[in-house]
Image: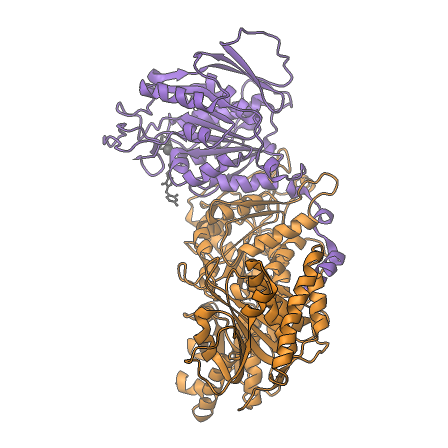
């Protein structure tokens, strides 16, 4: 029988039942790979449920540093009876199937192209532990121990991990190590030389961290000096605020008084959450909220107010599978359009698209700087895949020379020294951005009335068509200024010159880059462009201009980013070929490269740009 | 009836303790209908701030949408104002207050803005006890959208259209008392004698203070069959008593016999002195307040004046444990933990 053999390059998947303690065992496994110095990508595939439903944890090990999903499973750890058959079928030919053989496999589990690895997890636990809860928990640790032997992961790595994990709860160290050893020993006794997948320690993770994107976003908000958060719970955004609170409690409590240098308020709904953000930002604090698609829908009216009355505010949208409640615990990039144009009337919002936790950290800081400078809301479009899964990325960095740029805000002294009449919405320096004042600044100068109804340059209510048009044009001019300030795209040129491009953003980035390399192996050359922000900068426009046709890779059904590119940059839609994944699972490199290869091979026969564009 | 004056110098330039004239508290010219109750309330807010010697720039005026919500443009022109979206003023006020706890927040809303579209936010700002004054200019109808019945219209009351309202009404004072507000009062736009001391006390109260002010809409709901018309309110209004607001610096000397007069010291040391008209009302008891409101309602009467007062309720900031320094004044050094700390945070992700 053919056995898959690979070193530091495979996919292992754990099939569990949620609420049984498998998450921490699986995390420990992923961390052991990280600490062995090999790039690793764990992904949690979980139900919208608290206990008793199937959950999976897919770990990609890849020493070349490809961090997207690859597709396919080389090794399955199957502990969930409900999904066992499906899990059994999913293993690639030549792969491995680890299961609890306390009871023998049913006769319908027939495959002679995979290697079965039975470990009597239940039996071992019954012998070792009297307490049913312990039996449950340690079952997970035992299979991790078995993997340590089977995949050749150094046992010391686990020893250190357990010690770190239970710092402060030392009593738990020995029993956990014991459970690991139970699994290790059983595998060693029964499955010498069974597994062809191996871990060989490397040193590839210098300067890297393994962390979820939501933590990155929250830390970015801390470092940006955000003090007010109003929010309403919704998966997958809740952990942004949870992490913000955790680090605030650690870093933002005044040591002398014990008082909080922050305020976090759980609102009654997302409308209120956004209202709080705008009230606080209007009043000179940096404020944010985090939500997902359903919350963005509710916040639309306030976003329009913020756009028109020019109030800062940061909104973190951790996208999930829509429409409506959709698949709340699955990922998608399907709020791209609704976020960019949220609210009635002519509105549009600055959006940032982070691709890894480090970008979450940086863009979170960026968002606060941009929102205050531009006096308009900024939306960070993360997603469940990035927000809730641990992602490998570069360490977070902060330049201690940074000074916050609070934008065009007049101080008391500046108000006193003004020579001309101040107008809240006067564009005095050609950027389309007026100077604002914070309530309480000056006893007699600088007060104004903020309103979502039409106003003139001096913030006075007006129904004059001319004044209205002037203000709408100035907002458009401000939009042009935004184009010069938002993060620029990252271009990755192919080794050979080519007229084919690929555009991707956010969590499509990793898989897209790997797919480009896969195509390159087949002598198909593609230049890549990672979009980081809306509005699109000049570089995006130029890149599109320089290519005959371009793939646009996104995780939604309707090609939302493509729609925006076509409309905003007035590009012939035929120049774009969409690659769309919207099944709720993170997009894979194989899925993308297959379409690259199909299209480009065809193009060799009939060049696409000619065929399509006549 | 009094109207808001335009921004011209007042003839008698009486100054208050901080040297401001009444004109310093004026706003833009009102564009509401002549005779609208809302204008009188604006005038009372203006007068209260003048008499309390509050620096106008230390006030933030918050509102939603409606004729009532427009009024912040017509008083305290030297204060910042925020005319937000329909029914959502409470959340905007909450955010503003979180950012700077040192300002006085005066929220103005309508009965539509509060009791219909904004009912949820109203309920929640009450239970969080946000330190603000919340004034409802209650005309029982949607003035700005041309007079539809609102949720505070009494059952059977009819506006200009003449169709009696079939639905039961929401009593915002009762709701606020149930939800834990520390200061709850009802008044009438036409009774400045009562309204001004109530506003002054509400501003001095720390925590959420509701004043539900019946404020007739002369254009759509001042009919003979309306229970929110000038005539009806004047004829059916019963005050819980007369009411003095005693600022901090005035020494309290007079002694009254218990039962008729009650003196309640507010958080900032000022006091309200109540000459009670009814012995049935115990201002510190929610149950008593609800009973009295309902007792008068059964008689077809409107109970006005102070209804409930508990000066010692913790406000939102106290519950959250926020620093006394306004959050919007914290410095980079207080907010940013620096790269050294980030390095150790990075270590925890390895
Ligand atoms: C979301 C939304 N829905 C509807 C409206 C239309 N609207 C404007 S004011 C108003 C009612 C205002 O009534 P109230 O708060 O009682 O104020 P009044 O005009 O009576 O003082 C309505 C429904 C709106 N502005 N926004
Ligand atoms: S319509 Fe009614 S509420 Fe509106 S301004 Fe006129 S009188 Fe006042
Ligand atoms: Mg009304």
In the rendered image, residue B323, in percent from the top left (x then y), is placed at: 67, 39
User: Foreground residue, A516 or A609?
Assistant: A516
Asked if residue A243 lies left or right of residue A322, the reply is right
The quarter holding residue B329 reads top right
Q: Is residue A257 above or below residue B295?
A: below
The quarter holding residue A107 reads bottom left
Q: Is residue A315 above or below residue A76?
A: above
Which chain is tinted orange? A
In the rendered image, residue A156, in percent from the top left (x then y), is placed at: 73, 71
The quarter holding residue A530 reads bottom right
Q: Is residue A546 visible?
A: no
User: Foreground residue, A449 or A381?
Assistant: A381
User: Foreground residue, B158 or B338?
Assistant: B338
* Residue at point 65%, 56% (across, down): A219
Residue sitting at the far bottom: A605
In the rendered image, residue A419, in percent from the top left (x then y), is placed at: 65, 42
Q: Which quarter of the figure is the C terminus of chain A placed in?
A: bottom left
* Residue at point 26%, 32% (across, down): B165
User: Foreground residue, A575 or A467?
Assistant: A575
In the rendered image, residue A165, in percent from the top left (x then y), is placed at: 68, 61
Which chain is tinted purple? B
Q: Is residue A55 above or below residue B226?
A: below
């Amino acid at each position: 029988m053919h056995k898959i053999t690979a070193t530091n390059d495979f996919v292992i998947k754990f099939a569990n039942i949620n609420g049984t303690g498998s998450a921490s065992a699986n995390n420990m496994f992923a961390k052991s790979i990280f600490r062995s110095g090999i790039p690793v990508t764990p992904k949690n595939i979980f139900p919208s449920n608290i206990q008793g439903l199937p959950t999976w944890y897919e770990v990609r090990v890849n020493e070349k540093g490809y961090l997207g999903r690859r597709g396919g499973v080389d090794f399955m750890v199957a502990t969930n009876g409900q999904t066992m058959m499906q899990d059994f079928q999913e293993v690639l030919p030549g792969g491995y199937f680890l299961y609890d053989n306390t009871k023998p496999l049913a006769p319908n589990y027939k495959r002679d192209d995979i290697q079965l690895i039975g470990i009597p997890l239940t039996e071992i636990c019954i012998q070792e532990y009297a307490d049913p809860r312990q039996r449950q928990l340690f079952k997970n640790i035992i299979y991790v121990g078995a993997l340590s032997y089977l995949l050749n992961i150094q046992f010391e790595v686990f020893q250190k991990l357990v010690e770190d994990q239970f710092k402060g709860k030392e009593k738990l160290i020995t029993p956990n190590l014991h459970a690991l050893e139970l699994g290790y020993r059983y595998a060693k006794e029964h499955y010498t030389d069974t597994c062809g997948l191996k871990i060989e320690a490397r040193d590839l993770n210098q300067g890297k961290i393994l962390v979820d994107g939501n933590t990155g976003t929250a830390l970015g908000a801390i470092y940006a000096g955000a003090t007010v958060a109003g929010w309403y719970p919704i998966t997958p955004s809740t952990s942004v605020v949870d992490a913000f609170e955790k680090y605030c409690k650690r870093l933002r409590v005044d040591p002398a008084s014990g008082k909080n240098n922050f305020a976090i308020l759980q609102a009654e709904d997302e409308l209120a959450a956004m209202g709080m953000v705008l009230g606080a930002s209007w009043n000179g604090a940096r404020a944010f909220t985090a939500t997902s698609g359903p919350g963005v829908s509710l916040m639309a009216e306030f976003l329009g107010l913020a756009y028109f009355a020019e109030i800062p505010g940061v909104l973190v949208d951790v996208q999930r599978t829509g429409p409506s409640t959709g698949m709340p615990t699955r990922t998608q990039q399907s709020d791209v359009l609704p976020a960019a144009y949220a609210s009635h009337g002519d509105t549009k919002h600055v959006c940032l698209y982070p691709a890894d936790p480090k970008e979450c950290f940086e863009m979170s800081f960026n968002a606060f700087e941009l929102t205050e400078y531009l006096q308009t809301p900024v939306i960070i479009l993360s997603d469940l895949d990035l927000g809730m899964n641990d992602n490998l990325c570069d360490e977070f960095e902060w330049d201690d020379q940074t000074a916050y740029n609070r934008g065009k805000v007049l101080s008391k002294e500046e108000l006193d020294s003004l020579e001309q009449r101040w107008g809240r919405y006067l564009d005095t320096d050609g950027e389309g951005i007026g100077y604002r004042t914070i309530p309480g600044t000056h006893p007699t100068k600088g007060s104004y009335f903020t309103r979502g109804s039409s106003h003139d340059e001096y913030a006075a209510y007006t129904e004059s068509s001319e004044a209205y048009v002037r203000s709408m044009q100035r907002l458009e001019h401000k939009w042009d200024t935004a184009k010069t300030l938002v993060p620029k795209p990252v271009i990755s040129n192919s080794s050979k010159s080519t007229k084919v491009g690929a555009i991707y953003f956010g969590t499509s980035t990793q898989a897209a880059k790997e797919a480009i390399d896969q195509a390159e192996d087949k002598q198909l050359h593609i230049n890549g462009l990672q979009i980081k922000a809306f509005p699109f900068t000049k570089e995006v426009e130029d890149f599109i201009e320089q290519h005959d046709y371009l793939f646009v890779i996104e995780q939604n059904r309707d090609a939302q980013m493509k729609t925006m590119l076509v409309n905003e940059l007035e590009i012939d839609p035929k120049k774009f070929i969409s690659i769309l994944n919207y099944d709720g699972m993170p997009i894979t490199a194989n899925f993308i490269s297959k379409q690259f290869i199909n299209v480009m091979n065809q193009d060799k026969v009939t060049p696409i740009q000619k065929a399509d564009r006549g | 009836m009094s109207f808001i004056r335009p921004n011209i110098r007042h003839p008698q330039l009486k100054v208050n303790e901080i040297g401001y004239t009444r004109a310093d508290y004026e706003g833009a010219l009102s564009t509401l209908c002549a005779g609208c109750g809302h204008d009188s309330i604006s005038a009372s807010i203006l007068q209260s701030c003048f008499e309390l010697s509050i620096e106008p720039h230390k006030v933030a005026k918050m509102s939603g949408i409606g004729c009532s919500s427009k009024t912040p443009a017509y008083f305290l022109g030297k204060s910042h104002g925020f005319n937000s979206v329909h029914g959502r003023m409470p959340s905007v006020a909450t955010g503003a207050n979180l950012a700077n706890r040192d300002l006085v927040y005066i929220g103005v809303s309508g009965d539509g803005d509060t009791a219909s579209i904004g009912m949820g936010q109203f309920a929640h700002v009450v239970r969080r006890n946000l330190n603000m004054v919340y004034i409802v200019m209650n005309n029982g109808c949607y003035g700005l959208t041309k007079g539809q019945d609102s949720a505070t219209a009494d059952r059977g009351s009819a506006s200009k259209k003449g169709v009696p309202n079939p639905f039961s009404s929401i009593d915002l004072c009762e709701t606020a008392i149930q939800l834990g507000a520390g200061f709850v009062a009802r008044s009438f736009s036409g009774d400045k004698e009562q309204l001004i001391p109530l506003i002054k006390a509400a501003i001095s109260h720390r925590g959420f203070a509701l004043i539900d002010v019946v404020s007739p809409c002369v254009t759509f709901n001042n009919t003979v069959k309306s229970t929110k018309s000038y005539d009806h309110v004047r004829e059916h209004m019963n005050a819980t008593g007369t009411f003095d607001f005693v600022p901090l610096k005035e020494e309290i000397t007079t002694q009254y016999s218990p039962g008729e007069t009650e003196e309640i010291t507010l958080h900032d040391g000022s006091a309200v002195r109540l000459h009670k008209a009814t012995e049935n009302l115990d201002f510190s008891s929610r149950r008593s307040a609800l009973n009295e409101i309902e007792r008068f309602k059964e008689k077809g009467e409107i109970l006005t004046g102070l209804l409930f007062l508990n000066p010692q309720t913790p406000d939102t900031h106290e519950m959250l444990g926020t620093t006394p320094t306004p959050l919007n004044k914290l410095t980079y050094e207080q907010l940013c933990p620096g790269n050294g700390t980030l390095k150790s945070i990075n270590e925890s992700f390895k």
